[in-house]
Image (spheres, rainbow, N blue to C red):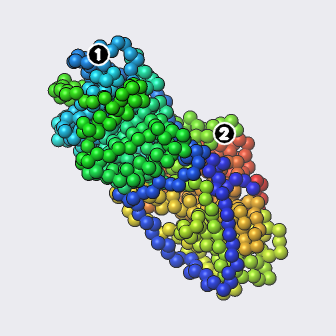
C-alpha cells in the first residue's frame, strides 16, 4: 500500500480496536462536536519534551521550514545583488556613523545607520544587526529604557560593526504613497501594511516583509569589505527581539544572537510584525529561539514584563536543548529588575556575551558602556525631507510584486516530466505540510470500535478515531462485507456530516450500500473532531489556531491512516484507501490527497480565482495560493488515481492535467465539469487501475 503521508513525517501508528458490544454507540450523523479551544498570543505555552539530539535536530528543521512558509519565504526568493547606498559619514572618537539605504525589493528601501570602529585598522571586524523595538522614535529613540544608537556606538568602540535599521513604516522605511515622517505616525503606518484579508491567502504579512528585510540586512553587512562573515550577530529588544530570533531560526550565517525581553512562554508578541499567519499553531517563541542552537545565544529578561519567568521556565527549557547538543556553555539567560527595556544594564550583559564569542576578549565582563552622544536626528535620517528615491513603490505595488513573486515561483515548478515531479515534491511537500498545519511529531492514531454488529452479509461498527490518546475523537460508521477477501476501503466524507444513519439492523443505505455490493469496505465520517471555530479573522486567530479546513484535512489524514493500518474489529488490513468527498468535503479531500490512495472529489463548482471564495469560513487557509490551492495538493498525489467532478467552469485543472500527462499517467486522471451520479463514480472506481 502507498505511504499515506510523505516519508518525512510518516506517523507511527498504533490502532486499537476494542469489540465492546455492551457499550452504547454515541449519537450518529448530525451530532455537533464542540468548537475548538482558542489559543491567543497570551495563552501559556509549554516547551515540548525532547529526549535526544536527533529528535531536536529534526524538530529544528521543521521549525525553520515553518517560519519560512509562514512568512511567505518558501521557497526562498531569488536574491538580487545587494543594492546599498552608503553616504554622509560622520567621524567621532573611536567610531564613525553613516547613512544607509538598501533596496530590499524593487522600489522598496530599508533605511538605517552604519556604525564602524575607527583607529583599529582595516579589520575584518565582527558585524552586528540591530533591529529596534516599538519605541515611539524607532531606531532614533534614545532614552534610559532603550537606545539603539547607544548600543551601536558602544559596539563600534569595542571593535565591531553595527547596523541599525527600521521596522517597516518607521522613519525612512516607508512606501511611495506614505506621506509625512513625523514620530507621531510611525506605529500607525507600521501596522497598516497588508491588513486586507486576501493577503493571508498568500502569506503576505508585515512579519514576512520584516523578516525578508532582516535577511537582506544580513546580506548587506556580509558584503562589507571590513566585515568578518564568520562573526555575524543580531540583537534587538521587544519587537526587535522577535526579529532577532526569527532571523536566527532560518539563518546559519549568524554566529551569535541576543533577543532581549521577548522570548516568553506567555505573551508572544502583540503587533502584526510578530504574528505571521500559522506561525505559532505548533511552535512558541521558546522553540523558535531554540532553533538557533548550538550557536551562542543569550536571553535578557526583565522582572517587569512577560519575560519575568525566564529563570525558571524559558531559560531552563532552551538550556536543555543546548545541553543535548553538548553546547551548554553557549547559552546563557539573565534577568534584571526593570520594566520592559534594553537599558544600559541589559546592554552590558550583551556586550560581555558578544565580547566572549565574537571578540574572544579574555575579560568580556570589562566591556562596559562609556558615555556617548547620539547624533541629532537630522544627521541620521536617510531621507530627511521625506522624499524617497524616484520610482519608490507604493504599498499596493509592493503587495502585487509579492504576489507576482509567488506566481512566478509556482510557474517555475510546472511538471513536464518525472524529473520535474521530483523537484516539485521537494519544494511543495514541505509547503503543503506547513500550510495545512498537518505536521506532528510521531504519535499514535487510535481507533476504538463500538456497538459491533455481525450479519450474514457484513460487519458493522461505530468507530471513534483519535489522532492520539486524549485527543478529540472523529466519529465514523464502518461496514465491511463478510466472507470476502476485501482489499479496498472507501472513506466517505460530506461537508455537512449529515449522512443517513444505519437502520436498526445496522444495514447501510444509498452510496455505502452500493459500494458494499461492489465488494468494497466503507468508512463514513459522521462527525469531525471539532466543530465550527469562531471568527477566524480576529485577534490573530490563524497565527495560533488551525482554521476549519486545516482541522478537517488533519482529520481526514488521521482517518486514512487508521483505515490503512488495522481497518476493522478483526484486524483486517486494506491495500488501498480511497478518499471520497462530497460537497465542500470534496475540496477538503483534495487538500488531503497526498495522504490517501485514490481520490474522488466533488469540486463544488468553486471559482478558485476568487479571493472571496477562498476566504469562506470552511475553506480559509493562510498561504493556500502559494501551494497552488486544491490543484497543487492534488498534484502531490500523482500518479495515483484522481477523479474531479462538478468542477464547473472556474475550477483550475490545467496544471494537474499537465502533471499527469508529463509523468505518463493521464489514464489515472478524470475531470468532469458536471456533477456525476454516484453509480458512475462507483463504476470508475471499479475500472481505474492503480
**Residue at the image point whose x is 49% and y is 33% from the top:** 252
Q: In which quarter of the image is residue 20?
A: bottom right
Residue 422, which numbered label? 2
Residue 118, which numbered label? 1
Towards the viewer: 676 or 81: 81
Label 1 neighbour load within 10 Å: few <14, some 14-19, many 20+:
some
Instruction: Estimate the x, y position of residue 668 in percent, counting from the top left.
Output: 72, 51
Q: Earlier in the sequence, mark 2 or mark 1?
A: 1
Q: In this view, does 122 lie to the left or right of 344?
A: right
Q: Is residue 335 left or right of residue 460?
A: left
Towards the viewer: 120 or 27: 120
Residue 328, which numbered label? none
Instruction: Estimate the x, y position of residue 137 in percent, counting from the top left.
Output: 21, 37
Q: Is residue 49 left or right of residue 191?
A: right
Q: In this view, does 540 lie to the left or right of 305?
A: right
Instruction: Estimate the x, y position of residue 570 in percent, counting from the top left.
Output: 76, 73
Cα distance in 3D space between marks 2 and 1: 52 Å
Instruction: Estimate the x, y position of residue 220 in percent, counting from the top left.
Output: 39, 25
Amino acid at each position: 500500500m502507498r505511504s499515506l503521508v510523505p516519508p518525512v513525517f510518516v506517523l507511527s501508528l498504533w490502532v486499537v480496536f476494542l469489540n465492546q458490544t455492551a457499550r452504547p454507540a454515541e449519537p450518529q450523523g448530525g451530532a455537533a462536536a464542540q468548537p475548538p479551544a482558542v489559543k491567543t498570543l497570551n495563552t501559556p505555552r509549554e516547551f515540548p519534551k525532547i529526549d535526544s539530539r536527533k529528535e531536536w535536530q529534526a524538530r529544528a528543521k521543521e521549525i525553520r521550514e515553518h517560519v519560512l512558509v509562514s512568512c511567505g519565504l518558501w521557497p526562498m526568493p531569488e536574491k538580487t545583488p545587494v543594492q546599498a547606498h552608503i553616504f554622509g559619514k560622520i567621524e567621532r572618537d573611536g567610531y564613525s556613523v553613516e547613512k544607509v539605504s538598501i533596496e530590499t525589493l524593487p522600489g522598496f528601501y530599508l533605511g538605517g545607520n552604519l556604525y564602524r570602529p575607527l583607529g583599529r585598522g582595516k579589520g575584518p571586524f565582527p558585524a552586528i544587526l540591530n533591529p529596534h523595538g516599538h519605541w515611539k522614535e524607532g531606531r532614533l529613540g534614545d532614552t534610559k529604557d532603550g537606545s539603539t544608537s547607544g548600543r551601536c556606538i558602544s559596539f563600534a568602540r569595542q571593535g565591531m560593526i553595527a547596523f541599525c535599521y527600521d521596522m517597516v513604516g518607521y522613519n525612512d522605511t516607508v512606501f511611495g504613497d506614505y506621506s509625512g515622517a513625523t514620530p507621531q505616525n510611525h506605529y500607525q503606518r507600521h501596522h497598516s501594511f497588508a491588513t486586507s484579508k486576501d493577503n493571508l491567502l498568500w502569506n503576505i504579512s508585515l512579519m514576512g516583509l520584516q523578516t525578508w528585510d532582516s535577511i537582506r540586512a544580513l546580506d548587506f553587512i556580509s558584503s562589507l569589505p571590513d566585515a568578518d562573515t564568520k562573526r555575524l550577530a543580531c540583537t534587538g529588544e521587544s519587537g526587535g527581539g522577535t526579529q532577532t530570533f526569527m532571523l536566527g531560526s532560518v539563518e546559519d550565517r549568524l554566529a551569535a544572537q541576543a533577543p532581549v525581553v521577548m522570548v516568553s512562554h506567555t505573551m508572544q508578541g502583540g503587533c502584526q510584525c510578530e504574528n505571521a499567519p500559522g506561525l505559532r499553531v505548533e511552535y512558541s517563541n521558546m522553540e523558535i529561539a531554540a532553533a538557533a542552537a548550538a550557536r551562542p545565544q543569550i536571553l535578557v529578561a526583565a522582572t517587569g514584563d512577560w519575560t519575568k519567568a525566564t529563570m525558571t521556565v524559558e531559560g531552563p527549557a532552551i538550556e536543555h536543548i543546548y545541553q543535548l547538543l553538548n553546547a551548554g556553555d553557549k547559552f546563557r539567560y539573565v534577568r534584571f529588575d526593570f520594566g520592559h527595556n534594553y537599558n544600559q544594564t541589559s546592554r552590558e550583559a550583551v556586550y560581555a556575551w558578544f565580547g566572549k564569542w565574537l571578540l574572544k576578549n579574555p575579560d568580556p565582563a570589562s566591556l562596559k558602556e562609556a558615555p556617548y552622544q547620539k547624533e541629532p536626528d537630522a544627521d541620521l535620517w536617510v531621507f530627511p525631507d521625506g522624499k524617497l528615491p524616484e520610482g519608490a513603490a507604493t504599498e499596493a505595488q509592493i503587495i502585487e510584486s509579492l504576489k507576482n513573486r509567488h506566481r512566478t515561483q509556482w510557474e517555475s515548478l510546472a511538471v513536464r516530466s518525472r524529473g520535474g515531479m521530483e523537484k516539485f515534491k521537494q519544494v511543495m511537500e514541505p509547503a503543503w505540510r506547513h500550510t495545512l498545519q498537518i505536521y506532528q511529531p510521531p504519535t499514535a492514531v487510535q481507533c476504538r470500535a463500538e456497538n459491533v454488529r455481525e450479519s450474514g452479509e457484513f460487519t458493522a461498527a461505530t468507530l471513534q478515531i483519535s489522532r492520539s490518546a486524549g485527543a478529540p475523537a472523529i466519529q465514523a460508521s464502518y461496514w465491511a462485507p463478510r466472507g470476502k477477501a476485501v482489499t479496498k476501503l472507501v472513506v466517505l466524507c460530506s461537508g455537512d456530516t449529515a449522512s443517513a444513519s444505519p437502520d436498526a439492523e445496522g444495514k447501510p443505505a444509498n452510496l455505502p450500500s452500493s459500494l458494499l455490493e461492489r465488494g468494497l469496505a466503507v468508512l463514513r465520517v459522521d462527525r469531525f473532531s471539532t466543530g465550527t471555530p469562531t471568527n477566524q479573522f480576529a485577534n490573530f486567530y490563524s497565527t495560533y489556531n488551525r482554521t476549519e479546513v486545516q482541522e478537517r484535512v488533519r482529520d481526514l489524514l488521521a482517518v486514512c491512516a487508521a483505515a490503512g493500518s488495522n481497518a476493522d474489529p478483526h484486524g483486517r488490513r486494506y491495500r488501498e484507501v480511497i478518499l471520497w468527498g462530497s460537497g465542500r468535503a470534496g475540496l477538503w479531500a483534495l487538500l488531503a490527497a497526498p495522504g490517501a490512495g485514490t481520490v474522488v472529489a466533488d469540486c463544488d463548482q468553486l471559482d478558485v480565482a476568487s479571493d472571496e471564495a477562498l476566504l469562506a469560513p470552511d475553506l480559509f487557509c493562510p498561504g493556500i495560493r502559494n501551494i497552488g490551492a486544491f490543484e497543487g495538493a492534488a498534484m502531490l498525489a500523482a500518479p495515483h488515481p484522481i477523479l474531479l467532478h462538478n468542477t464547473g467552469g472556474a475550477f483550475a485543472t490545467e496544471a494537474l492535467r499537465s502533471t499527469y500527462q508529463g509523468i505518463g499517467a493521464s489514464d489515472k486522471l478524470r475531470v468532469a465539469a458536471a456533477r456525476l451520479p454516484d453509480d458512475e463514480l462507483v463504476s470508475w472506481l471499479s475500472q481505474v487501475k492503480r
